[in-house]
Image (cartoon, rainbow, N blue to C red):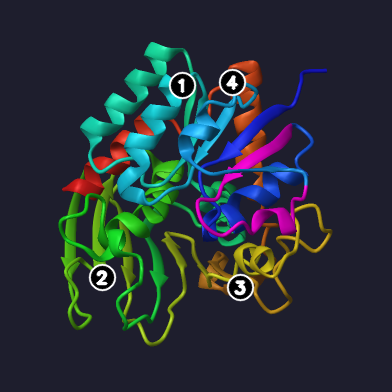
Amino acid sequence: MAATIVTGLMAYGMSGRIFHAPFIHTNPNFTLKGIVERNQKNASAIYPDIISYNSIDELLNDAEVELIIVNTPSNLHLEHAIKALRAGKHVLVEKPAAATAAQVKELFDVGRETGKHIMIYQNRRYDSGFLSTKAVIESGRLGTLQEVIFRMDRYKAQLGVKAFKETKDTPANGLVYDLGPHLIDNVIALFGRPLSFHKTTGMYREGSEVPDYFHFHLTYPNQLNVYLTAGLLMAEEQPGFVVNGTLGSFIKARTDVQEAQLDKGMMPNDEAYGLEPEGSEGKLVTIGVDNKKTTEAIASDKGDYMQIFDAVYHTVRNNALFPITEEHIAWQLELLEA
């Protein structure tokens, strides 16, 4: 049996606490060696056996650590990922991987140069709502697809406290780079690179320096139109997934529970993890013979961010192709930076 992958996290903010540490801790293929905590030392309350590194350099100098998770502020992702690769570590880096497609190429070039894997964390491929929508599309029950609408609606009128997201002179800022990677990656996972796209952004919050609204219109073969929207002043959340085809429609709200469960301390190996509550089903409406309409409730698939870490293991240990490929990220950045 292959040895576990000894892993270190570059930070223990919200993402480290919720999206990374619980999965490395509970996945038997990994060992959580330590986390960088420059100021407050909080991680040991949950993970008493870990090392609390005082700096990123201290973590990178630990020869036992094979895998680094780069979950620092988004404007530092490129710098820190390259630094980890040059330190001889495999790297899992949060979205956005960089600010431009050229920077993404540089990142993967360094991975090839150092012989280390660079993997991009796109957890929303494993949301319950996206998995359910993907299954309905692949079933063929909707016929030829005409229109796909994915949304992420929020209402946050106040400017955020994280300056790197709110400052116009900081690379990879604003809502486009925050929620855009999630929506674009969902579409790329389903349909690949678009034939063309049009991008609209806006700034509506008082004092905002960066876009807090975006809308993409993507076109695909066979007259498929895809619409991606997110905003921070959406008072009434709309369905996150709407798919219309020649034989039917599917509508699903964004009711994935994983983030809320993890935030409350539930671990990914809990039997209830990732299971949406009753009443969260998607609605499938199909047209049969004689134009008869049938409506069905479609139970949601189990949300499962652990699939990302299983893929990391197989990539590092077995040289398997990571599901979020270099091409996927390059295509994503073409849209984000446009």
Q: Which residue is mark 4?
A: 320
Q: Residues within 10 Å of mark 2 (few under 14, many from 20)?
A: many
**Among numbered discs 1 and 2, the one appearing first in the sequence:** 1
Label 3 vs label 2, nearer the camera: 2
Q: Which residue is mark 3?
A: 294
Q: Residues within 10 Å of mark 3 (few under 14, many from 20)?
A: few
Q: Quadrant of residue 211?
A: bottom left
Disc 4 + disc 2, Cβ < 8 Å: no
**Among numbered discs 4 and 3, the one appearing first in the sequence:** 3
> Horizontal placement of 73 versus 23: left or right?
left
Q: Which residue is mark 2?
A: 212
Label 1 vs label 2, nearer the camera: 1
Label 4 vs label 2, nearer the camera: 2
**Among numbered discs 1 and 4, the one appearing first in the sequence:** 1
Q: Which residue is mark 1?
A: 87
| Callout 2: SS | loop
